[in-house]
Image (spheres, grey):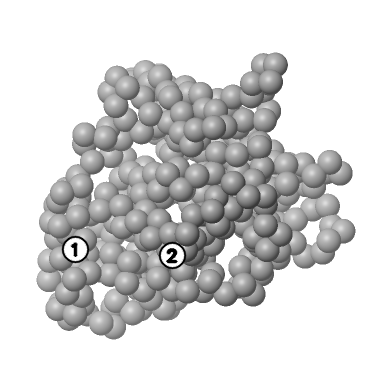
């Protein structure tokens, strides 16, 4: 592996925090499985509706014209493409811009830089393939278990995800979101439990801290993903920062209506708040509390904080209603950890 390239905007080969756990496989799992939380679905690997979900997504994107004719082009453009509605039931465009265009674009660029730093040939192509792969898995998981047309997959996979890749291929765009917004991946530490074999402590999260001046010690703070938190960051002199935010978390999905067999879905939300500690924008520890019944509390402490001699593991704990509990451990050298799970 070569040394950190000064031309990189998002990837940094740091031995601590969330950046120490950054790896294409972890990104694929976080991004691909993230939607499971919104649907409160089983996280068992055997329960993932991959076959029906893939069939549904393929039928949607392989022949989008007839589906959009049935759904209504005006409705599709108003709700999915252009920011013309502020009603949460009809503002599906919001996550398309924030999580797919901007967040997905940033993730593609960071993946490309990871591949370049690890001497993978054609790193930007590898980054694009990885990014589109996790986007596709996300749509597949979201669209199971029923096979039915879906305009969300059309908007995401055919419009916003590719546009994010194109947009962040330009250095000026990547520089702006790196320098001015200080964007980064702040996903938790994904792990596997083995009784049953299931995914724990996952979710695709992005941070943005708006830098309005180099000298300011207080910055606006934004966390995006399953949770949307707005708050402030206090910068300290040793390159560490404390951030606090409060906002809303996705707690479920419901169908607002169905036109000609094609549904429109939106989300249930609940309150959430979080406290975050980072060094050089690599997350060291986080605490989230929320109204989400499966995860009232989530604590993540990343490698580089707890030291046992020269060994510095990461640990996490999640707690839900009626005693649901997951605890796990991670290490820097592996992009995922192991977890014990106690159901309610």
Is residue 213 visible to us here? Answer: yes
Q: Residue at x 63, y 65 (%)?
A: 177
Q: Residues within 10 Å of mark 1 (few under 14, many from 20)?
A: some
Q: Nearer the viewer, mark 2 or mark 1?
A: 2
The answer to whether 252 is drawn above or below residue 129 in the figure is: above
Judge left or right: residue 46 versus residue 5.
left
Residue receiving disc 2: 125
Q: Residue at x 87, y 58 (%)?
A: 215
Q: Position of residue 129 (x, y in %)?
A: 38, 60
Q: Give the quarter of the image for residue 126.
A: bottom left
Residues at discs 2 and 1 in contact (Cβ within 8 Å): no
Mark closer to the chain start, 2 or 1? 1
Residue receiving disc 1: 58
Find the distance from the CA under tag 2 to the CA under tag 1: 22 Å
User: Exactly how many numbered labels are in the figure?
Assistant: 2
Q: Position of residue 332 (x, y in %)?
A: 57, 32
Q: Residues within 10 Å of mark 2 (few under 14, many from 20)?
A: some
The answer to whether 310 is drawn above or below residue 252 in the figure is: above
Q: Position of residue 148 (x, y in %)?
A: 14, 60
Q: Residue at x 33, y 79 (%)?
A: 77
Describe the element under mark 1 as helix, strand or loop: helix
The answer to whether 105 is drawn above or below residue 208 in the figure is: below
């Amino acid at each position: 592996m070569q040394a950190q390239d000064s031309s990189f905007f998002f990837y940094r080969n740091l031995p601590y925090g969330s950046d120490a756990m950054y790896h294409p496989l972890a990104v694929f799992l976080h991004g691909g499985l993230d939607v499971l939380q919104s649907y409160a679905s089983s996280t068992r690997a055997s329960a993932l509706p991959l076959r029906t979900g893939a069939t549904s997504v393929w039928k949607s994107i392989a022949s989008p014209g007839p589906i959009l004719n049935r759904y209504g082009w005006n409705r599709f453009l108003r709700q999915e493409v252009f920011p013309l509605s502020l009603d949460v039931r009809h503002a599906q465009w919001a996550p398309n811009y924030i999580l797919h265009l901007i967040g997905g674009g940033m993730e593609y660029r960071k993946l490309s830089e990871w591949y370049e730093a690890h001497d993978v040939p054609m790193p930007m192509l590898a980054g694009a393939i990885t990014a589109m792969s996790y986007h596709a898995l996300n749509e597949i998981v979201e669209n199971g278990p029923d096979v039915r047309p879906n305009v969300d997959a059309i908007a995401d996979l055919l419009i916003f995800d590719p546009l994010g890749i194109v947009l962040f291929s330009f250095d000026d765009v990547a520089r702006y979101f790196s320098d001015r917004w200080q964007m980064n991946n702040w996903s938790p530490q994904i792990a596997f439990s083995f009784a049953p074999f299931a995914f724990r402590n996952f979710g695709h999260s992005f941070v943005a801290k708006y830098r309005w001046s180099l000298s300011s010690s207080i910055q606006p703070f934004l966390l995006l993903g399953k949770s949307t938190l707005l708050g402030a960051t206090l910068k300290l002199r040793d390159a560490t920062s404390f951030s606090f935010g409060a906002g809303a978390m996705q707690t479920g999905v419901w169908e607002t209506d169905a036109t000609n067999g094609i549904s429109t879905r939106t989300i249930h939300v609940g309150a959430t708040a979080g406290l975050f500690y980072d060094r050089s924008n690599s997350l060291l520890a986080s605490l989230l509390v929320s109204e989400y019944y499966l995860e009232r509390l989530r604590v993540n402490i990343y490698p580089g904080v707890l030291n046992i001699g020269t060994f510095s593991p990461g640990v996490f704990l999640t707690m839900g209603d009626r005693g649901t509990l997951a605890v796990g451990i991670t290490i820097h050298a592996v992009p995922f950890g192991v977890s014990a799970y106690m159901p309610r």
